[in-house]
């Protein structure tokens, strides 16, 4: 089974349409799936809308945590996923074609020798990123820092990804960072544990303009990198 984890924060405008599109996509693919909405900290009607969707669609469940934190929402969603494989989508950024190609690359077995994470890279050859120039630059700088500071092999760690949950449960339990660093920590820890991570190029078209100003994002991300460094230490020498 595939578990789609969908973090949702103040998504009353888009949640219904996004869940409907993902639901329809997996029904038509005849794949067994669940969709987990994980809300925290919303001040709009997101929760009520999520509950209403769950009452209509048996494959969808929702949980609501105390305070706004994207990483904590991902952690909670992955921990309560029942699938062997999880797909992380955003409410404003999801792509079933990405899911198809990433699932082909992912190693589904419980003792994999192939990739345990497949990231939809906004920077890999063949990708096209329609976000603003500033956002693309921020992604490039962040990825460069990750490569130098943590030896990460991927060109991008944020955004859509597919995970072999059966293989990654131990790694997920070890992760300490929340916010926008949680999924990056999973990837770094998986690589350090000798697991293979992979990427496929994506076409990035977010369904709405950015909600976070770059001025707020930069200090938050830099603070996150300092925290990651403290939690993970330097690149191990082999
Ligand atoms: N549960 C939860 N979900 C969040 C939180 N912040 C963002 N999300 C969700 O994460 C996904 C991406 O959020 P966005 O606000 O679009 O963030 P982004 O695309 O990284 O950045 P911008 O849109 O440029 O600000 C969406 O599904 C949001 O609803 C949060 O604090 N808690
Ligand atoms: Mg967005």
Image (cartoon, rainbow, N blue to C red):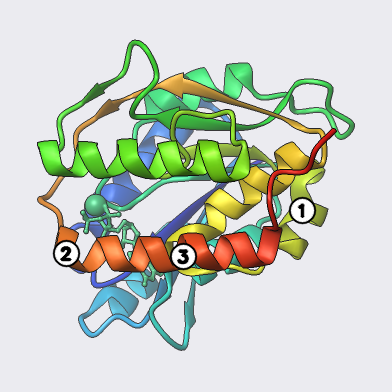
| Residue highlighted by disc 2 | 215
CA gap, disc 3 to disc 1? 19 Å
Element class at badge 1: helix
Whether ligand 1 has any atom under 8 Å from the Cβ at mark 2 is answered as no
Instruction: Quadrant for the N terminus, please.
Output: top right
Residue 40 point in image, percent of width and height: 40, 78
Q: CA distance from mark 1 to mark 2?
A: 32 Å
- Residue 236: x percent and y percent? 77, 43
- The image quadrant that residue 163 belongs to is top right
Tell whether 206 sits left or right of 74.
Answer: left
Residue under the point 63% across and 58% down = 78
Compared with 2, 102 (above or below) is: above
Q: Residue at x 76, y 46 (%)?
A: 168
Q: Nearer the viewer, residue 219 or 114?
A: 219
Residue at screen point 42% across, 25% down: 98
Is residue 13 rendered to the left or right of residue 196?
Answer: left
Q: Which residue is mark 3?
A: 224
């Amino acid at each position: 089974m595939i578990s789609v984890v969908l973090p949702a924060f103040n998504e009353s405008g888009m949640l219904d349409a996004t869940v409907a599109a993902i639901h329809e996509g997996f029904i038509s693919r005849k794949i067994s799936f669940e969709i987990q909405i994980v809300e925290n900290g919303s001040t709009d009607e997101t929760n009520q809308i999520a509950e209403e969707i769950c009452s209509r669609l048996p494959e969808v469940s929702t949980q609501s945590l105390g305070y706004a934190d994207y990483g904590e929402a991902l952690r909670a969603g992955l921990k309560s996923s029942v699938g062997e494989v999880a797909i992380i989508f955003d409410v404003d950024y999801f792509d079933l074609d990405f899911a198809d190609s990433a699932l082909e690359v992912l190693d589904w077995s419980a003792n994999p020798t192939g990739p345990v994470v497949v990231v939809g890279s906004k920077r890999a050859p063949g990708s096209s990123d329609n976000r603003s120039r500033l956002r693309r630059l921020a992604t490039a700088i962040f990825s460069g820092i990750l490569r130098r500071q943590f030896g990460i092999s991927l060109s991008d760690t944020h955004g859509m990804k597919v995970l072999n949950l059966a293989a990654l449960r131990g790694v997920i339990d070890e992760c300490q960072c929340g916010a926008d660093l949680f999924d990056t920590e999973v990837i770094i820890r998986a690589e350090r544990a000798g697991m293979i991570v992979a990427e496929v190029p994506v076409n990035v078209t977010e369904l709405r303009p950015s909600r976070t100003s770059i001025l707020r994002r930069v200090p938050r991300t830099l603070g996150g990198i300092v925290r990651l460094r403290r939690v993970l230490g330097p690149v191990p020498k082999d």
